[in-house]
């Protein structure tokens, strides 16, 4: 989800609800303690220089049960962050602490913002030797294949 998307969704809500990937709700007394811009430059395992930029929201639970973040207040915080940090319409990443700090993607189901799991991946499969999973065949399968598909066997 991009920054413009969350602002659009917030403008139609009366309350804010974040749901974890397992379906549990983030407690309603959460705070957005940070909105940041994270620029990452890195080389992948194939040696290609890459860059990535995301907008980071950090959610935090306090023992402050009497104050709840309302949609219009979060829009104000976002707009302040846009001005101060020069934010552009990038993807949002959400930090939330369960057993450890987790980083999540963000989606919306019409009522709740959904924290989605993120996955790592090799960005240079063609350069680092990982290759396509389909290209790896167990040795015993090769022996069986070569026995039934020997030249002149008529199997192909």
Image (spheres, helix red, strand yellow):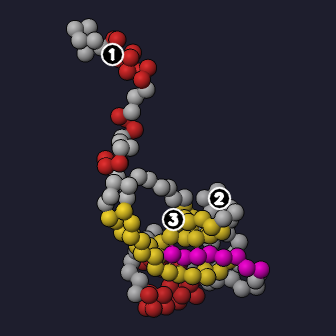
- Disc 1 or disc 3, which is closer to the eye? 1
| Residue 89 appears left or right of 60 | left
Mark 2, residue position:
23
Which quadrant holds residue 71?
Answer: bottom right
| In magenta segment, residue 102 | no
Find the residue positioned furthest to the left.
152
Q: Nearer the viewer, residue 12 or 24?
A: 24
Which quadrant holds residue 23?
Answer: bottom right
Task: Give the crowd class for mark 3: few <14, some 14-19, many >=20 residues within 10 Å.
Answer: some
| Residue 135 appears left or right of 24 | left
- Gap between marks 3 and 2, in whole Å? 15 Å
- Disc 3 or disc 2, which is closer to the eye? 3
SS type, badge 2: loop
Name the magenta segment's main secondary structure: strand
Figure label count: 3
Mark 1, residue position:
146
Identify whether 19 is placed above or below 65: above
Q: Which residues are magenta?
A: 56-63
> Quick one: label 3 or label 2, which is nearer the N terminus?
2
Which quadrant holds residue 131?
Answer: top left
Residue visible at 26% across and 8% down?
153
- Disc 2 or disc 1, which is closer to the eye? 1
- Gap between marks 2 and 1, in whole Å? 49 Å
Residue 83 position within the rendered picture, expressed as x and y whole percent measured from the top left: 43, 91
Residue visible at 39% across and 33% down?
136
| In magenta segment, residue 58 | yes
> Quick one: label 1 or label 3, which is nearer the N terminus?
3
Mark 3, residue position:
105
Residue 123 position within the rendered picture, expressed as x and y whole percent measured from the top left: 37, 55
Residue visible at 50% across and 85% down?
78
């Amino acid at each position: 989800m991009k920054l413009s998307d969350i602002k659009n969704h917030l403008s139609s809500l009366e309350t804010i609800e974040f749901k974890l990937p397992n379906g549990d709700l983030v407690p309603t007394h959460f705070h957005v303690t940070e909105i940041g811009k994270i620029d990452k430059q890195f080389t992948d395992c194939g040696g290609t220089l890459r860059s990535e930029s995301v907008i980071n929201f950090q959610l935090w639970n306090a023992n402050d049960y009497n104050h709840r973040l309302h949609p219009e207040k979060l829009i104000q915080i976002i707009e302040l962050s846009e001005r101060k940090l020069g934010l552009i319409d990038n993807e949002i990443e959400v930090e939330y602490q369960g057993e450890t700090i987790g980083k999540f993607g963000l989606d919306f189901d019409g009522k709740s913002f959904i924290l989605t799991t993120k996955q790592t991946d090799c960005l240079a499969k063609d350069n680092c030797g990982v290759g396509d999973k389909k290209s790896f065949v167990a040795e015993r399968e090769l022996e069986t294949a070569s026995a039934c598909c020997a030249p002149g066997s008529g199997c192909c």
